[in-house]
Image (tube, rainbow, N blue to C red):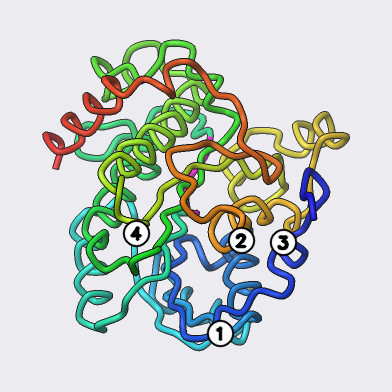
Amino acid sequence: MAFGFHSTAEEVADGIDLGGQTWLVTGVSSGLGHETARVLASRGARIIGAARTEAKAQQALDEVGADGMAVACELSEPGQVREAVEKVRASGATLAGIIANAGIMALPTLQQKNGVELQLYTNHVGHFVLVTGLLDRLADDGRVVMLSSGAHFLAKRGLELDNLSGETNYDAWRMYGRSKLANILFARSIARQLEGTGKTANAVHPGVIQTNLARHVSNAEAMFERLRPNMKSVGQGAATQVYVAIHPDNAGVSGEYFADCAVADTLKEAKDDALADALWEATEALL
């Protein structure tokens, strides 16, 4: 069956048995992460749900009826992310996959953490710590799914590795786009590291969905009204990440960027492995 723009996470997961599998989902407390956890749990998966607080993560697991473990993982706090990594490792779980779903978007004014622009720090650096800390816990056919966005096309100046602080001509959407470009490049780097193992890493664009992600956007209602003809429901928005994560069609597919449940095109910078290497080195230097 072909899937596309209108497909839902329920539809792409139909008939797939995830019994005995454990999946880590970040941003599980709302929006696409919540829906993703619900659908995976409904197919028998055990969910390690990560949110800003353990209480929020546990509430989400309870709401979707998921068996699993709640983990506090504030992505802008590397120390807490490392604690989350250690908690997952201590559980002894083998991960069928990691769905790096959480993020922040379009902060109206420049905010920084440890001297780095906060969108890049949260969306990329936080997930870098989490994913690299758990790569060796992946099953032999484990999958890493990085939530990127079509907004990476807004990164008109590329990664701006000489502007990690965001202080040069700060623009909310350009900086968000930069963080989403980083997500794609990180997935490519992981994919190259996993070559020949049976494990995979890909990035996805979920579409335009009205979720809590837009909480920082000024005049968000007007933005969504303008975009309404191209918007998806939460179920449709979660479809691509669920498809890439669990569908048999994607076994062995790695280093790609998906939108509407299909491989899609990107900025040319998103295919630059030398730039991906430079990002990796810059991220390690930050940490």
Element at label 3: helix
Disc 1 target residue: 66
Q: Amino acid at mark 3?
A: Val
Q: Tell which of 218 and 68 is nearer to you.
A: 68
| Image position of 4 (left or right of 266) | right
Checking the image for residue 12, the label placed there is 3
Q: Which-is-in-front pick, marks 4 and 2?
A: 2
Point out residue 92 in the picture as x, y percentages from the top left corner.
Answer: 24, 82
Magenta span: chief secondary structure = loop
Question: Is disc 3 in contact with disc 4, using a CB cutoff of under 8 Å?
Answer: no
Outermost residue, front side: 196
Q: Amino acid at mark 1?
A: Ala
Q: Amino acid at mark 4?
A: Glu
Q: Tell which of 70 and 265 is nearer to you.
A: 265
Disc 2 target residue: 247
Residue stretch rendered in magenta on the structure:
101-105
Q: Earlier in the sequence, mark 4 or mark 2?
A: 4
Point out residue 16 in the picture as x, y percentages from the top left corner.
Answer: 65, 74
Q: Residue at x 53, y 59 (%)?
A: 245
Element at label 1: loop
